[in-house]
Amino acid sequence: MKGTPWAFLAFVGSIIFLVLFMADRATKVGVDRLSRMNLPPQSVLEADPNLKLVSERSPYMRTER
């Protein structure tokens, strides 16, 4: 009867350890998957065809100063 609380604590501790171990493993697998991902380079101008180029010399910037 004296060992019951210790056995319960050992059981709860092992469950917590397994949950944390699995969460850490899932995080590492996700990071590895992201580091191996290959994305083709895309131009920022291709994102939206309605984008307008605004430079320092454009009329839009001259009227805003």
Image: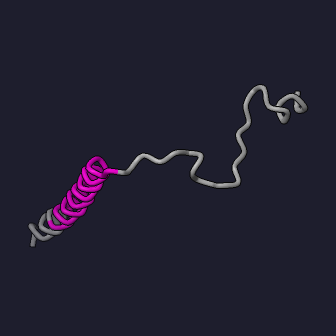
**Residue name at image x 65 percent, y 55 percent:** 49
Q: Is residue 2 left or right of residue 18?
A: left
Question: Height in image: 56 above or below 14?
Answer: above
Residue 56: image quadrant is top right
Give residue 25's position: percent from left, percent from top: 21, 56
Please, which residue is most extreme toward the right here? 63
Which one is nearer the viewer's eye here, 30 or 22? 30
Question: Height in image: 27 above or below 55?
Answer: below
Q: Is residue 34 magenta?
A: yes
Give residue 33's position: percent from left, percent from top: 27, 54
Which one is nearer the viewer's eye here, 21 or 10? 21
Give residue 50's position: percent from left, percent from top: 70, 54
Give residue 48's position: percent from left, percent from top: 63, 55
Q: Is residue 3 left or right of residue 19?
A: left
Q: Is residue 58 magenta?
A: no
Please, which residue is most extreme toward the bottom here? 1
Magenta-drawn segment: 11-38
Q: Is residue 54 left or right of residue 30?
A: right
The quadrant of the rendering that contains the C terminus is: top right
Q: Is residue 22 left or right of residue 4?
A: right
The quadrant of the rendering that contains the N terminus is: bottom left
Question: Height in image: 2 above or below 33?
Answer: below
**Residue name at image x 12 percent, y 67 percent:** 7
Q: Main secondary structure of the magenta part?
A: helix
Which one is nearer the viewer's eye here, 34 or 21? 34
**Residue name at image x 72 percent, y 45 percent:** 52
**In this figure, which colouring scheme has been used for the structure?**
one colour
